[in-house]
Amino acid sequence: MTPVAETAPSGSRTRRLGADFVAMTSGWVVRAALGVLISVITARYLRPDEMGRYAFLVWLAGLLPVVLSLGLPTTLTRYTAEATGGGRPATAGALLGLIVRWQTTVVLAAAALVMLVALGVPASWRLPLALTALSVPSQVVYASLAAFLSGLQMFGWQALLSVGMLALLAALFIIVAGLDGGVSGLMLAHAIANAAGLGVLAWLARRQGRRRGALPAPAPLSAAARADVIRYARGASALVILDAVVWQRTEVAFLQALASPAQIAFYALAFAVAAQISRIPYQASVVLFPSFPALVGGGRAAELAGLHATAMRYLVLLGAPLAVGLAVTAPGVVHVLYGPAYAPAAAVLAVLALGSLPAFAAGASPAVLHATKRQDRLLRRGVLAAVVDVVMAIALIPIAGALGAALASVVAQALGSLLAIRAAVRIAGAGVPAAALARIVGAAVLMGIVAAVPMVALGGVSGLACAVAVGAAAYPLALRALRALTAEDLDRSRVLIERLPSPARAGGLAVAGFLCRGPLPEPWSPSR
């Protein structure tokens, strides 16, 4: 019988999720800066055609671990969160050991196969492809260890580690560029950074697993539990492979076959910038994911509907200004960071930015389906979205190159996102907060209109800087003007403001009250 956990106060959940999100987002700010630095170093160092070859190898190095992971990281996060939520942490430790053993066998064989393939490709590809294979085992095992920590709802150290890995990679890239190591040197830098990150994460997973009682696992999984995990992982694996077509830049493969290397570079650079910006709502969805299976494991499945609706609204609240703002500033971003040689990437970036809005809204929907073991709905969605992506890519890339790839990507992702939302709503029994989402998106559009003025009038670095500053000020005011924030937002803000230093609490509450149009408590007390 599933134990029923004591219902946590809503304020406790807000504080925990808020703290985890702040930790992840703080790390994102630094990671985004380092990611942009790495892309700038690479684009300024390599010609567009060489950049296209490098982008293809990076895409391959990212795709292979996703496919070879076989859905096991998602399985691990889901069952770890459920086990710890139900007071059975040792089950999570036993599952971790089982999955890592499975993955090690598969990934070492795959890496050896890629190295054998490298012997038969043209000379210019041979060494870079072999070095790409070196990164694959580290990334696969890293994903499972990170999934285990996510299931334990331990996010802060992961954020710090990812910052450290990017800092190391940036330093290695500078050395490679200085020594003129070419594409091979850049892929070797990736392999070194991935191996170093895996070593640190393995130590961290062992340490946190012991603290939470998950490690060492006293006994292996029971036959029944193992069969349940295999059934779930089978569906999750099929879903991951389908999602790889839609979400893992599969368009790069079609660009490699149907367009010039420069078109790959334009698409890859635009995709990288768009991915960095979308990390904020993505981090929020990562933080939220374990909460859904934890509710199920704690016997509180009735709360899924409310959490899903709230999550959808906040993910769009975070993502809409980023999507619209990036689309407006795309020409300036590309020109300032990468130079005139990469100007065609601006239109690609604008399309990818605006196309991310449905994905933001659907950020928590897969968590509902995984928590309720209805991931088969995601599988059906994945098949349809993958077919649309492939058909559109084949049709549009020969005509429009990188822009055609971007259009294929956003249409397929939007379709998959909308189907995921529909499935989650039906299963959780909650409605979509359509009016609230419309007000939030409307506020983002108003912000974009205001930010476009300095972008068009000034241009260059000054126009970009002014557009960002004006947009940052305009968005909260637009939210207030359209009454997009509610009394519930003010209540959650109060819970988070309690964690601020004393001098900042009164000011923080005053700002929250102004934006939410809510009454302020008098006098302000830190105990509230």
Image: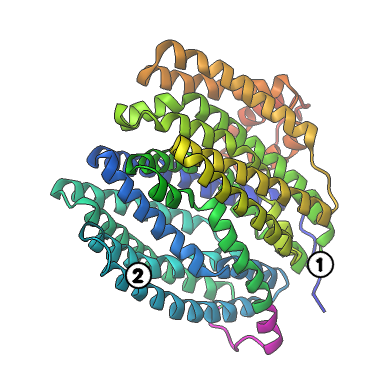
x, y percent for residue 369: 73, 60
Determine which of the numbered discs, if any, sits on residue 299 in the image. 1
Q: Nearer the viewer, mark 2 or mark 1?
A: 2
Q: Is residue 148 placed above or below 311 in the rendered structure?
A: below
Of mark 2 and mark 1, the one earlier in the sequence is 2
Instruction: Quarter of the image for the C terminus: give it.
Output: top right
In the figure, residue 476 lies in which quadrant? top right
Q: Looking at the picture, which amino acid does disc 1 mark?
A: Gly
The question of residue 492 being in magenta is answered with no
x, y percent for residue 153: 60, 61
**Range of residues picked out in magenta:** 215-228
x, y percent for residue 263: 38, 39
Q: Is residue 404 placed above or below 334 in the rendered structure?
A: below
Neighbour tally class for label 1: few under 14, some 14-19, many 20 plus, Cα within 10 Å: some
Q: Are marks 2 and 1 in contact (CB under 8 Å)?
A: no
x, y percent for residue 467: 48, 20
